[in-house]
Structure formats: structure tokens, C-alpha cells
Image (cartoon, grey):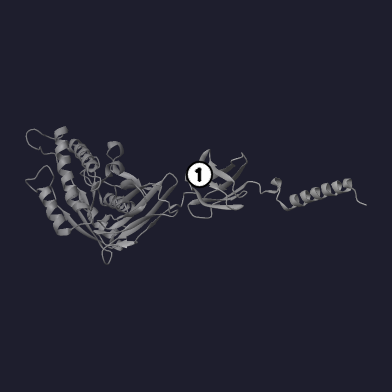
Amino acid sequence: MRTLRDDTRLLAFALCLAGVLAAAGAPPALAQAPLALHADARERGWIGATLSAAPGTVVTVAEDGAPLATVTAATTVTRLPRVARWRCDRRARELVATAADGAAAAAAVRTPSCRDRFAIDGPRRARPGRRVALRVRDRWRLGDLRASVCVLPPGGPPRCRERAPGTVRPRLGRPGEWRLRVRTPWQRATRSVRVARPGGRQRLLVTGDSMIQPLDDYLATALRDDGVRVTSDPRISTGISKPSLLDWAAHARRQAARARPDVTVVFLGANDGFPFGAGAPCCGAPWVAEYARRAAAMMRTYARGGRGRVLWLALPAPRGSFFRQTFPAVNAALRRAAADEPAAARLVRLDRYFTPGGRYRDAMTIGGRSVQVRQRDGVHLSSAGAAAAARIVVRTLRRERIVR
């Protein structure tokens, strides 16, 4: 016969068993998913993160203490596809996830370098005087980085400005190799466009006084295989300071209109030294300034608004007489003129090559042997000297990307 005491014991056992069974069916707090974070750079331009946390957990993802995102986990795994941008100044990145209860997890990732971030798209060939579309493209597709974008005409100087990725449309005025250069602290990219007429021929005008002969013939021979048509127009005994014999400013305008040169090579000044009025005798500062002004105007004329380029040759030092005063003054004026017109002209320093330090010499070593480079008058170049000068001019044309 069961007693009251037995019933009480049976009830206590049943309640205890029910509690054990209930506990076994519920997930204990210790069994919940721990906080974890993984970072990746799978999407171009972006760092993504995968967060593991118990549903309902509030988590903040930060970098260097700066919050990037705060989320409430809906499931045990939460994807944050664009939690941070790639950066050029830092490739090694570390993200930290912190829960409301203070639990934390970290993840490291390394992003690509910026050395190939920008690309340049556009044509490889164009006609002179045309505008072309050259597109600076951000491969990361972020658009948050500006770059120095330069248009480099053949011969220069570059035209640069800071800008975001996009399209530039420069007018490619004269034949030769034009370049678009993009520069950042991490990258330098260049796109070349060859500008040429149908058939690829260029027009070269060679002009000046008697100093240009026979250099003009050597240039015609040296550039024949490059498709350059050379027109020679020497004007013996003339000078910028003696317009009574030939007004060079007016003559330059006629030459430019008639020959339409892509390049003009000028060797002029051996016959100068005449005064520019009563207030500017040779060879003081007023004379140099006036000569520079007139030479610069001629440079602009030959340059034809960006459609041409001028190579003006400096005078090698003479042996003696009045030329020892006039040649340095002419060269000083030409240096000033070329510096004032960098887009139009370059001064080719034949004086440094033939007479370094202003010291005259009849002969010099070329190709391992002594060569007579001046004529008996101590002013003009000999045939060998003119050939050497022509090689310098051709090298300059190639260095300036005017001819290949």
C-alpha cells in the first residue's frame, strides 16, 4: 500500500526528470556561435567581410578605431560586401569586429598595388590638327584618386593639370609622336599617338644666312629615308639687325605661308651687329633685348600656331675680329627668345659642341680622329663640321619625337 510519503518522492522525481529533459532540448549559452571575422579583396576596389555571430548580436566593424559598419546579425553568418575601399597608401589592412558584450575578433587582408591602377585608352594614329579622345580609366572603378595628366607634344613642353579619371581631347597640331602621361605617386602610365599626314611625309624648312650651307644638304640626305621633304632657303649676308637687305620678319611670314613647315631649322646671325636705332647699338642689353624680341616673333611665325616646331642653331664662337662681340650677343638674345617661346622653339647649342666654354678651335676629335670643323675664315663650319652639326640636328629631331 502506497503511502503519502511515497507519492511525494515520486512527484519530486518527476519534476526533476522534466527539468533535465527541458534543459537537454534548449541550446545552452555556451553552445552559441563565437564571434569571428574574415576579410577578403575579391571585389575590385573593395574589401569585403564575413561576420560570424549569434543571431541578434549587435556588432561594429572598425579599422584603426574608426567605425566602418554596425550591423545586427540576422543569421549566424552575415556578409558585408563593401565594408572599406582599397587604398593606394596602405595595402596591409586589419579590420576589428566588436560585439556589444565586449567580445572582439580581427581579420587581416592585403589589397593590390596602385602601380597599374590607371589605364589610358585611345587611338594610336591621328592626322595633324585633329582632336582625339584619350580616356584615363580607373581600373578600380572608384574615381577617388586624382592624377597629374600631361599632354606632351613632340618637342614639348608638356601641358599638365590635376584631374580625376575621364576623357581629354587635345588638339594634336604638328606631326610626330604625341604622348598622354598619367602620373600618381604610385604609377606612371603613357599612351603614344603617332600624328602624320597620309603617306607619312613631313615638311622641313632649312633657312638662314651662309652659315646654313652645306648643313642643309646633309640634313636632306640624312632625313630622306624618314620621309622628310627638305626645302632649303639660304639668304647670304643677311641678318635680323640689317632689314635694309632683307626684312627677316616679313620673309619668315612668307616662308611659313608658302612652305607650311612642320619643322624649321634656322642658322642665322653671323652678319648681325647693326644698331637697332640710336638707342640700341650692338651689343649692349637694349640691343640683346630687341634682337630677342624679333627672333621670338620669327619663332612664333614658323611655329604656325602649334602646327610647326623650330630648331634655332646657336653660333659657335668665331676666331676673332668684331665677331667676338656680336656672336655672344646674338646667342644671348637667342637664349632669351627660346626661353620665352618654349612651345615654339628649341635652341640647339652648337656653340657648346664646337666651342665649349667659348674657346675657338679649328679641329676637334670626332670618331676617334682629329677633324677640321671650321673654314679658313674662322667663322663658317667646314664640310665635316656641317656634317657633324647635321647629326646633332637629326638627334634632336629624334629626341623630340618629331621623326622616328
Q: Nearer the viewer, residue 68 or 321?
A: 68
- State the residue in front, 276 or 109: 109
Q: Residues within 10 Å of mark 1 (few under 14, many from 20)?
A: some
Q: Is residue 16 left or right of residue 48?
A: right
Quadrant for residue 258, please give it.
Answer: bottom left
Q: Is residue 397 above or below residue 293?
A: below
At horizontal 49% and vertical 54% (from top left) the residue drawn is 44
Q: Is residue 12 left or right of residue 288?
A: right
The structure residue drawn at horizontal position 6% and vertical position 34%, both measured from the top left corner, is: 278
Residue located beneath label 1 in the image: 68
Q: Secondary structure at mark 1?
A: strand
Q: Which percent across, then down, holds residue 352?
A: 30, 41
Task: Decide: is 293 above or below 47.
Answer: above
Q: Amino acid at mark 1?
A: Leu
Q: Position of residue 267 (x, y in %)?
A: 21, 48
Q: Which residue of the protein is positioned furthest toward the right in this rendering? A: 1
Where is residue 57? Give x, y as percent: 59, 46
